Amino acid sequence: MKFSKIKLTTPYLNLAPVFYEKVDPTPLNKPFLISTSQSSAQLLGIDEELALDEELINIINGKTKLEGSQTFAMCYAGHQFGQFSGRLGDGRAINLGKVNGQNLQLKGAGLTLYSRHGDGRAVLRSSIREYLVSEAMFALGIETSRALALIGSETDVPREKWEKGAIVLRLSPTWVRFGTFEYLNAYKEHDKLQELADYVIDESFPYLKGSQDIYLKMYAEIVKNTAITIASWQCVGFNHGVMNTDNMAIDGRTIDYGPFAFLDNYNPHFVCNKTDTQGLYSFSSQPGAAFWNLDMLARTLSPLIQYELCEEVLDDNFWTTYHEIFTKIMLEKMGLQTEHEEDKELYQTLLRALASTDIDYTQFFRKLSRFKGEKSDILDTCINKQALDTWLDRYLQRLEKETLNEALRHAKMLKVNPKYILKNHILQEAITRAEEHDFSMVNELLKVALSPFEEHLELEHLCKATPLLSKNIKLSCSS
Ligand code: AMP
Ligand code: MG
């Protein structure tokens, strides 16, 4: 079946009208296709490659409706930087409907009831970032919304300067956010909390159906999934930047990519979001921020589940899951198969050593995946090498306890330590070219984003070291 022939359903519209606004997209002027992800297309259950034709552009531009589609914006609230912000909602995202467990959404498709002071648009720059990183996170094995296609246009959009409007067709098994529940609680729609919880169980946790204490179990799943996602962020060096509760997906996956960054050197205090002057969402604050958001959710759910019960689940499960997953991934990154008492201390010492030097976080682990005892292969590229030098000696000693041979260990490590990571400087290069109508680099980046562990010798310029002046760039929320 072709993409243009898929049939959508709209289960979200079976909820009470308070949950959404039915609204049509406002198409962009002179739209053109920039990129598609055939990998995402596979999620829709279509058995052909996406045809890159006018029909596809019209669908993404909101001009042509897929069969069964009824377009709508979702209502939600949220705590932004620790403060309750009241009603937010999809101010520029318009949902098309659902197929094969994926909810299709156009981001940047025009005004909705929830646009507040915004213009309902997304600019090319931020759309390229969200499109590529969605696919990158998936390939890195981190739960995330996906991106099927990106279109550009000639629609002028005012930001700090005039920019061009774009639309990303995003996919996610759910677009319900912590903030969706917060809206109902804040606006005294308490009877609707259960309606939404039932919807969430149906959509994201159907295996819970029929069990006792089902809402508490739902909360426990949200806690677990969120902890897993955040532990994965910490291991890959991902800084989300805007962990407001309206950007927290109810099934724990990563959504709403704004001023995100992958770390250059390992700096736990790094803040990628220029507007986050307090460092509330700094790299090392992310697990704590997730915990705080989960606590807000527990309070919001209190008309449905006794708060103390949720609190117990949160206290008992969040950090346990977080540390379990973090440790598991870290040991994989170091190539350790057997478990030894000193391993946790070994990676903690490593992180301290990495923080004391300027070596690139991603490149360090890639080099470690080929490390044969010649320390200069790693140390030659960094300054303040003392702590890392000492650590490598310890690591070599620890490796003696491993039973797997070196070649197999290296092969396994190369599958968990990516060669390609979407650093801001490389994304910026692709954006600058795209703004001049050259989209080749966007598509090259998509290729490495979707297979970050492969060598791609012809694309090695995409993993070059971050130029000094482009290190640790902070981005604004403008998008
Ligand atoms: P974000 O920081 O992108 O997650 O956005 C926070 C809220 O602002 C969400 O409710 C968005 O839908 C809304 N928003 C962001 N940008 C715009 C825009 N240009 N037009 C309308 N609403 C927007
Ligand atoms: Mg958002």
Image (cartoon, rainbow, N blue to C red):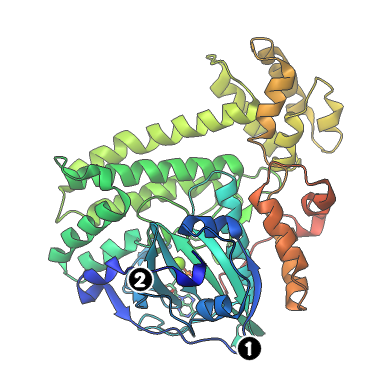
Q: Is residue 53 left or right of residue 242?
A: right
Residue type (three-letter) at the residue carrying disc 2: Ser
Amino acid bearing label 1? Lys
Q: Nearer the viewer, residue 162 or 22?
A: 22
> x and y percent of residue 476 in the render?
60, 69
| Residue bearing the label numbered 2 | 85
Query: Is residue 445 left or right of 341 when viewed as pictured?
Result: right
Quarter of the figure that contains the C terminus: bottom right
Q: Which of 71/184 is in front?
A: 71
Specify few, some or many for label 1: CA neighbours under 10 Å numbering under 14, 14-19, or 20 or more. Answer: few
Secondary structure of the residue carrying tag 2 is loop
**Label 1: which residue?**
30
Residue 355 position (above or below residue 254): above
* Quarter of image, res 384: top right
Question: Residue at horizontal 78%, vertical 47%?
Answer: 456
Q: Is residue 71 in sight in this rendering?
A: yes
Q: Are marks 1 and 2 in contact (CB under 8 Å)?
A: no
Quadrant for ligand 2 reads bottom left
Residue 174 in percent (x, y) is at 37, 59
Answer with the quarter of the image where residue 154 lies. Answer: bottom right
SS at badge 1:
loop
Q: Is residue 271 visible?
A: no
Distance between mark 1 and mark 2 Cα atoms = 36 Å
> Which of the two discs, 1 and 2, sits closer to the camera?
1
Q: Residues within 10 Å of mark 2 (few under 14, many from 20)?
A: some
Q: Does residue 389 lie above or below 148 as drawn?
A: above
Residue 325 is situated, as x and y percent measured from the top left of the image, at 47, 33
Residue at point 50% right, 67% down?
3
Q: Residue at x 18, y 62 (%)?
A: 195
Between 41 and 425, the one lying in front of the other is 41
